Image (tube, rainbow, N blue to C red):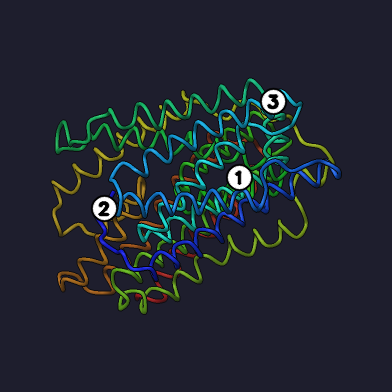
Amino acid sequence: MMPITLSDSNHLLRALLVSGSLGALIGLERQWDEQSRHDDTHVLAGLRTFTLWALFGVLCAWFSQTVHVLFFIAGFAAMVLWITIFLQRGGRGGSDLGFTTGAAAMLTFLIGGLVFWQQERVALVLAVSIMLLLALKPTLHRFTRGITTEDARSAMKFAAVSGVVLPLVPNESLGPYGAFNPHTVWLMVVLVSGVGFAGYLAVRGLGQQIGIAVTGLLGGLVSSVATTLTMSRQSRERPAESRDCSLAILLACTVMIGRVGLLVGIVSPKVLTVLWPSLVVVSLPGALWCCWRMIHGGSASASGACTPVGNPLRLRVALQFGALYAAIVFLVKATIAAEGNSGVLVVSGLSGLIDLDAITLSLSQMFRASTLSSTIASQGILLAILANTIIKAGMAAIFGAPALRLEVLCVLGITSITVIGACRIFFH
């Protein structure tokens, strides 16, 4: 608790007004919920009760400064004891009042303390969050009823991969040229696993075609390479979804180009003024195809049914991708060590095989530091996009189903030709 020495009555009145309003909002939701489910029921804790609990929290905070420092803690302990008795009596009477209302009541008391200690923003966010959580009870119940054993197992696997293993992996450069960073490699494993898991949740929540399209959009913001690998493998396992998977891949590739432009604009707007016409032209094949596919529908809409979705976490595939990433990083580092700054374009192409963001930021920063011309920087970024497009086309060809290979290779092939043409036209 921060020592705040505000003792004038204006501050107290303002705190009482704000906290009472927030408590009333929470109580209004509780009262509406009780009355909507049982028309003639007597609401044990509604608008008035939650308002009083919020006011009680403010007054306890006030007395902790004017009477005794432990007054607020004693008030909270009394609140917990009173609510415990309240819930026990409600349970004996057959009431539907549960622990959720008791937890909301204790949080309402603490909201009063936050408002008094001038944490109005935190109190407001907390109050709104409590209201949403309480109001979403039917939706959350429907969601949890639909969770299968496979869902829970997949969630636990992803939690172990991302939340347990990743923080423990050392984040330091090892081996020749400092090319092997265990943390970075495992982060790629997490990305591949995460894209698959996010797509699984999106399909479960939004439906087959919309869910996979959302996966592609999000994948373009995170890693279009990981999205390509995940969706290609999914199309091989469930060929009926190949057209939807190709939509996800090409959406990710198109969003990736926009992400590159955003990064360039943040670091060096002057480079963006030179580069943006090329980026627009390069993004056209993928953007036009995605628009056409979304208008005409994918495999799910064509067949009227979708294949049951299985376990989205393929750790073996993710580990293979991590190993490939480590090998390409070594190749890039070795080339940089051999060529130095004289091989900027070569290094740009090699770097694009593994990561577009790093080379994009590096070249933009080099132009900003006047060590590189805008033309060379732009050419380097386009070569990185070309290399990145080629490696994704290779992944689709190796891991994807025939229907996915046909569509993805056609569009990415046209995109690659467009990149080469943009280099020759805009930077001749």
For the residues marked 3 and 2, what is the alpha-carbon distance in whole angstroms?
Answer: 39 Å
Q: Residues within 10 Å of mark 1 (few under 14, many from 20)?
A: few
- Label 1 sits on a secondary structure element that is helix
For the residues marked 2 and 1, what is the alpha-carbon distance in whole angstroms?
Answer: 29 Å
Q: Which residue is mark 2?
A: 2
- The amino acid pointed to by label 3 is Gly
Point 79% across, 46% down: residue: 35
Q: Which residue is mark 1?
A: 133
- In the picture, the disc for residue 91 is 3
- The amino acid pointed to by label 2 is Met
The one nearer the camera, 297 or 327, is 297
Closest to the camera, between mark 2 and mark 1, is 2
Question: Image quadrant of residue 385?
Answer: bottom left
Side (left or right) of 107 relative to 371: right
Please, is residue 90 above or below residue 329 in the view?
above
User: How far across and how far down the image is residue 410, in percent?
Assistant: 60, 52
Q: Are marks 3 and 2 in contact (CB under 8 Å)?
A: no
Q: Is residue 403 visible?
A: no
- Label 3 sits on a secondary structure element that is helix
